[in-house]
Amino acid sequence: MTVSRVFVANRGEIALRVINACRALGVETVAAYSEADKDSLPARAADRAVLIGPARAADSYLNIESIIAAAKKTKADALHPGYGFLAERPELAEACAKNRIKFIGPSAESIRQMGNKIVARSLAKKFGVPVGAGSEKIRNAKEAAKIAATIGYPVLIKAAAGGGGRGMKIVSAPRELQRSFETAAAEAGAAFGDPTLYLERYIANARHIEVQILGDGHGNVVHVGERDCSLQRRHQKVVEEAPAAALAPALRAEIQAAAVTIAKKSGYENAGTIEFILDQDAEKYYFLEMNTRIQVEHPVSEMISGMDLVQEQIRIAGGAKLSLTQAGIKFSGHAIECRINAESAAHGFRPSPGLISAWRPPIGENIRLDSHCYSGYRVPPYYDSLLAKLIVHGRNRIEAVGRMQQALENFHVAGIDTTIPFLRFVTQRLEYVKGDVNTRWLEALLAATPLGASEVESASA
Amino acid sequence: MELTQDEVLKILDLIEKSNFDYMQLQVGELKLTVSKGNYVPQSIAASDQPQPVAKPQTPAKESKPKEKTPAPKPKAAAKINVAGGVPINAPMVGTFYAAPEPGAAPFVKLGAKIDEETTVGLIEVMKVFNAVQSRVNGVIADVRVQNGQFVEYGQTLFVVKPETAAKKKSR
């Protein structure tokens, strides 16, 4: 069974990315679009486009019935969910299976299993992969206090159904526990409909390291290197790199092998990412969670491996075996990605939708831009604020950093606020240039350096 | 001449303790900027570019949603009189929510007493929820927006009968 027509159930840059991958493979595409995305690039770039509903995501990109109906009507034999929206909803994978549409991603069972962080943790443990000191499901604040005392403060309260930092709280002393527990449970309940919490030891000097894996459903699983995504603001990644410069070769090999073990033993098919936390002081790593989709930051892995991960996803969904063995995957150089959002950093990262009057991205060797934007494009206010991903490659990290700085300097956007000036600021910091950061660095920098409106900003504001 | 990564890092170590805000290092093809200074919202090196001053073009009339008006701040909302009342206008474009969560009671109803600090609704734009504050003391005299409705910047959401006038009367 091969895939011949892919329904793209997403929008923005990832929809365009999937369409381009399909085109390269000679596969037809049908783009789903909402009323707000009528004139969007993906809707125009696909072989066909189907209006699936009004602007509101709940009525369009999050509406499984509409999406399945549109995919059937246009006789698509496969569906790519992108990331976000329905990508990690097992119900979509199930609905696809029921309607004989191949879901380009893992099985509904895998999504369900890994979607529950407590289940995922115990699976990792069972497979012999280190998980941080922590708990199973905790019922109340009293139980939490007992476990926290054995783990040692600070502890991290997390939501079993978690994501995006909601339901997550750092607790540094016992007296804060009760209140944090209640807030976290309420947040988790509101955001995921499941208030279940668990505890983890909080690691102060940490790096976020994740390993890209691919499984073909024929028993073959490979990793495509790791990424360092330690630069985060409010648990949202801001800058990502590959490889992770902080890892010594032996530790790198260990983490990669651990990721392959988890994917292999859980029978995982298609692309996925295993997230770890690296304790920089102890030089130890722990399993965090698994993401059962293609991720925003996948291009950095492509840049150092030369692989096209989305094309691999489509081939795997069509029943093919992996195109490369582990030994065949060679890594070279260093890649960095910056997420460019429609936000004003000087105004507390306020969203900035609207008309892009000028869009002049940098062009050059070793520069890649994944974006759906253009001069004259109106950024709708309904969806997330990602405009573009700017990716550069260098022979080593310093070269890549210099190239990213240049690329950001040559990126000009007018009409709306973007995070480009903020990214220039971040990538020029001495600590960043040296690679001397951890997961708390960016927030600490923001706390110490006011980004508030300067003269230049207020003159045009 | 080309420097290795280690050599560049060594240079950075040397300059780390020195007193600088901003420096550029150029070795062969490698151009590196290192800064300890403050945030600059506009590019310093963008002098070759026409400054993207968003001000001049008044957002085209034919365009429906009036997003991101780079010009005025919406704080002048309380100025215009709407049928004897003071309007509460949308401070931004987005989806208006009358209640904190689906099924919950709305923040305010017709006839509700409010003060300057009262939250009268939420506007969601790009997945960020923003509280709309009344900024007026008084009573909700008219509700001009529905839950879930898409509102434009400056659109009137509520009309408030100011309290000061009412107070004087009752005295």
Image: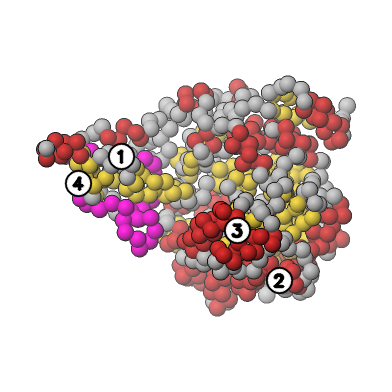
Q: Earlier in the sequence, mark 4 or mark 1?
A: 1
Choose mark 4 or mark 3, whichever is in front: 3
Residue A157's label in the rendered image is 3
Which residue is labeled 4 in the image? B141
Q: Residue at x 52, y 33 (%)?
A: A346
The amino acid pointed to by label 3 is Ile
Assign the N terminus of chain A to one quadrant of the image.
Answer: bottom right
- How many C-alpha atoms fall within 10 Å of the one at disc 3: few (<14), some, or many (≥20)? many
Task: Work out whether residue A327 can be spotted.
Answer: yes
How much space separates mark 2 and mark 1, taking CA atoms? 53 Å
**Residue A110 position (above or below residue A392):** below
Asked if disc 4 and disc 3 are in contact, CB closer than 8 Å, the reply is no
How much space separates mark 4 and mark 2, taking CA atoms? 59 Å
Assign the C terminus of chain A to one quadrant of the image.
Answer: top left
The amino acid pointed to by label 2 is Leu
Q: Chain of mark 2?
A: A
How much space separates mark 1 and mark 3, taking CA atoms? 36 Å
Residue A236's label in the rendered image is none
- How many C-alpha atoms fall within 10 Å of the one at disc 4: few (<14), some, or many (≥20)? many
For residue B66, what is the image quadrant?
top left
The amino acid pointed to by label 1 is Glu
Which residue is labeled 2 in the image? A123
As drawn, the residue found furthest toward the bottom would be A98
Which residues make up the magenta segment?
B83-111
Question: Nearest the camera: A43 or B14?
Answer: B14
Judging from the image, what secondary structure is the residue with disc 4 in? strand
Count of residue discs:
4
Asked if disc 1 and disc 3 are in contact, CB closer than 8 Å, the reply is no
